Amino acid sequence: MGKKVKNKDIAARLGLSGTLVSLVLNGKADQHGIKKETQERVLAVARQMGYYNALAEKGEPAPAEEKPGIIGMVVPSMNDPFIYEITPYLQKAFASIGLGFSVFTRDPDDMRFNRLTTSLKKFFSGMILVGHAADDSVVRALNRDSYPVVLLEKSIKRMRLNTVCTDRVAGAAIMTQHLTSLGLKNLLIVSGEDTASYDKEMLEELRNSTKKSKNFDSVHFTVAGLPRAGEKFDFTAIENFLRPPHRSDAIIVLNSPLVFPLYLALQEKNIRIPQDVALVSMEDGIGFDLLTTPVTRLRRPLPAMSLKVANIIWSEVKNQGKSKYKRQVNMAPELLIRSSCGSYLK
């Protein structure tokens, strides 16, 4: 039998009074004018701490009505490392509050997907739309019907929506400060051909951050294609910036899938990392620490992002998509320093 969770334990976690927590758990919150947002926080934390599980083990009925359901996450592709890195954390977060969780890719045929949205609304209690899966037409349709939705790693500034994103401004500043501390002066920023629209915001933040720093002699930008199976990485665009008159001493890669091909291409050209050029990534990638020269990179706060997404969508489900407040959450990434940037910290 699990450890008994008491009202005072939940109250201590939230910084609220035991009386308030008791009123919420016993379904008397509305009678005493307790805000809906506070009720949602109490119920969510109660479930996460195992309060309902303890009652179920003793065969006691839950004192507050629960709303079961399944949350669907629509992703543009299952090939994105971010998707399969965050999925286990989301699975755990939703399990802790009693919600099912399912992931599926968006049909590339927009018209077919738009028609499918109506059916999905009947099956899922709420949806998470990731990145490019959250286009304007789908978001408008769901928002118009007050359907519970959270955008993950995507924001639409002209619409009032719940969003959870990595703080790109903070990420650019963290990486810029680190490269400055290493005395690197000439930067080459590399983005992917297929991710130009997604990279645009990060490129702008890096441009602003490096310009504001005033510690760099030159900052250049180029685009590289991700090689298909059996093909070699086209090193031409990169090579032009690794010799005079440019002579970049650090490469910043925006997309983690580009890191491995670029890393191998540098090795083939006998360009040493970090002795000849430093290499860093704005995204984390599986296996980066297994390379001969581990790669310095930014890592998204996946556990914290998952909990925030779960709590927001749970709140939306409880309020049938009509929560009073829409939350735009930006979370700063963590810098993992490895030897590819010239710093030999492990």
Image (cartoon, rainbow, N blue to C red):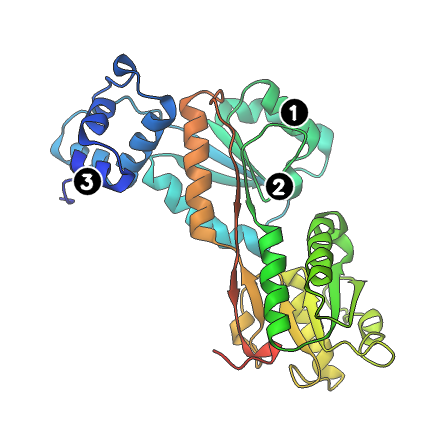
Q: Quadrant of residue 69?
A: top left
Q: Residue at x 37, y 46 (%)?
A: 92
Numbered circle sitting on residue 153: none
Give the residue type that dot 3 points to. Asp
**Relative to 161, 228 lies left or right:** right
Circle nearer the N terminus (2, 3): 3
- The residue nearer to you, when weighing 258 against 204, is 204
**On the image, numbered disc 3 is attached to which residue?**
9
- Dot 1 surroundings within 10 Å: few (below 14), some, or many (20 or more)? few
**Structural distance between the alpha carbons of marks 3 and 1:** 41 Å
Report the amino acid beneath label 2: Lys
Which residue ends up furthest to the top in the rendered image? 31
Q: Please report whichever mark, 3 or 1, sits nearer to the chain's N-terminal start.
A: 3
User: Where, by quadrant of the figure, is residue 18 drawn?
Assistant: top left
CA neighbours of label 2 inside 10 A, class few (<14), some (14 to 19), many (20+) = many
Q: Which residue is mark 2?
A: 154
Q: Position of residue 90 (x, y in %)?
A: 44, 45
Q: Quadrant of the N terminus?
A: top left
Separation (CA) of disc 1 from disc 2 = 14 Å
Quarter residue 186 falls in? bottom right
Residue linked to disc 1: 140
- Dot 3 falls on a residue whose secondary structure is helix
At label 1, the amino acid type is: Arg
